[in-house]
Image (tube, rainbow, N blue to C red):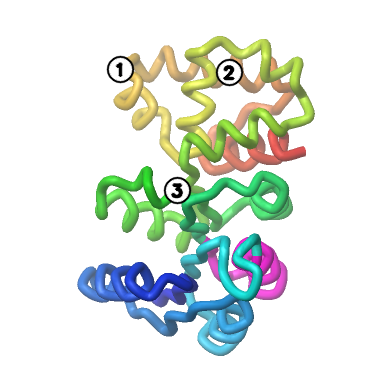
Amino acid sequence: MRVVIAEDAAMMREGLVRLLTDRGFEVCAAVADADSLRSAVADALPDVAVVDIRMPPTHTDEGLRAAIDIRRDHPGVGVLVFSQYVETRYATRLLTDRPSGVGYLLKDRVADVADFVAALTRVAAGGTALDPEVVGHLMRAGRDVAGLASLTPRERAVLSAMAEGRSNAGIAAALAITPGVVEKHVANIFAKLGLPSSDGDNRRVLAVLRHLGG
């Protein structure tokens, strides 16, 4: 799997290069600013780009805006935002314009290298990987406040797990409930949010994200 990394902190950038190289990834480029990221992706056309949000020159949202450009200009390239911050406005655009092959993880909440590698692999394959805290921000920013407010705490937990890319079996294991109970919660979620049900886990996630990001 071919990867481009955009991270302005040199130690973090080199750490990611070493981590991914040791696990069999090919790191095509490791850059420190958004313009270099755009150029590296255009040149290498990797399977996935790992992108920090705050990079030179203003250290505000350059990385996230570059990620949106990459998804528009190179639809075959997955994008995994890996940051300390949640930037709701651009995150909404990133996730709802074409929410497949996209992820958003928070650096201080990734405790296991295997989880990070699994999320990166899922995004490269066209799936979704979202930190529950990011999902929470999107839910609070969503237009359908009444629909979200009608969800029970358990349904919100299931919805967050769905947005992380988990299957029904994965949700059941994480929440210590049966798959049958998960199916009922999923059906209730779609009914309350006015979304059509689907057998495909990724399609369910994308529909939920479109709705929440509205």
- Calculate the distance from the C-alpha at mark 2 to the C-alpha at mark 1: 18 Å
- Calculate the distance from the C-alpha at mark 3 to the C-alpha at mark 1: 25 Å
Q: Residues within 10 Å of mark 2 (few under 14, many from 20)?
A: some
Residue 15 percent across, percent down from the top left? 29, 70
Residue 94 lies, with reference to residue 138, above or below; the image says below
In what element is the residue under mark 1?
loop
Mark whose residue sits in front, 3 or 1: 3
**In this image, 4 relative to 73: left or right?**
left
Residue 39 lies, with reference to residue 68, above or below; the image says below
Q: Residues within 10 Å of mark 3 (few under 14, many from 20)?
A: some
Residue type, numbered disc 2: Ala
Say which quarter of the image contains residue 68.
bottom right
Sequence-wise, the earlier of marks 2 and 1 is 1
Q: Are marks 3 and 1 in contact (CB under 8 Å)?
A: no
- The residue where tag 1 is placed is 176
Which stretch is magenta?
A: 62-79
Residue 179 within the segment the image draws in magenta? no
Residue 57 percent across, percent down from the top left? 63, 75
Residue 47 visible in rendering: no
Mark whose residue sits in front, 2 or 1: 1
- The kind of secondary structure the magenta stretch mainly shows is helix
